[in-house]
Amino acid sequence: MKLSEVKHVLKNSETIGFQLPNGTLVPTHFHVTEVGKINKQFIDCGGTVRNETKVNFQLWDSDDYDHRLHPGKLLSIIALSEKILNIEDLEIEVEYQAETIGKFGLDFDGKHFLLTTQQTDCLAKDNCGIPEKPKVKLSDLNAEPQCTPGGNCC
């Protein structure tokens, strides 16, 4: 989910809720302690230099039950971050600590922001000797075998 999509949702919301991949909700007394821009420069296993930039939200909950983050407040934090950090309309990554800090993607189901699981991947499969999975048409999987006389398929 991109930053512009989050801002659109917040403008049309009265409350903010985040749901973990297991279905539980982040406690309602959470805070967004950081809105930032993460620049990652790295070399993949094939030797290619890569750059990745994302917007980062860090969620935190504690025993402060008297303060709730409202959509307008988060919008103002985002606006300040865009201005000061020159944040563009980038994909969002969310950090949230349960046992350890987890990194999640972000989606929206019409009611809650969904923290989505992310997967690692080899970005240089062709250089590592990892074969690409063949693409198969679903229509070919359900097709009846074509039998011809003498074909030994019937």
Image: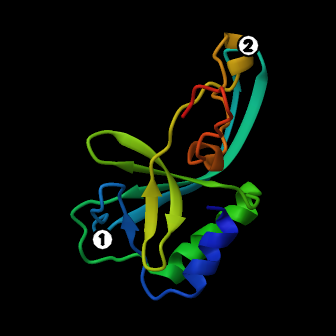
Q: Secondary structure at mark 1?
A: loop
Which residue lies at the image location 39% right of the left edge and 65% below the top edge? 31
Q: Secondary structure at mark 2?
A: helix
- Which residue corresponds to mark 1? 29
- Which residue corresponds to mark 2? 127
Alpha-carbon span between mark 1 and mark 2? 47 Å
Q: Is residue 4 above or below residue 41?
A: below
Give the residue type at disc 2.
Asn
Which residue lies at the image location 62% right of the left edge and 68% below the top edge? 78
Give the residue type at disc 1.
His
First reached walking from the N terminus: tag 1 or tag 2 = 1
Q: Say whether residue 5 is left or right of residue 94.
A: right
State the quadrant of the C terminus: top right
Residue 131: horizontal and vertical position, in percent?
Answer: 65, 18
Which residue lies at the image location 57% right of the left edge and 30% below the top edge? 153
Please give the label number shown on residue 110: none
Seen as rendered, the residue at the extreme front is 149
Residue 38 position by quadrant: top right
Residue 150 position by quadrant: top right
Which residue lies at the image location 52% right of the left edge and 59% below the top edge? 106
Q: Say whether residue 102 is left or right of residue 22.
A: right
Q: Nearer the viewer, residue 136 or 120?
A: 136
Neighbours of disc 1 within 10 Å: few (<14), some (14-19), many (20+)? some
Of badges 1 and 2, nearer the viewer stands: 2
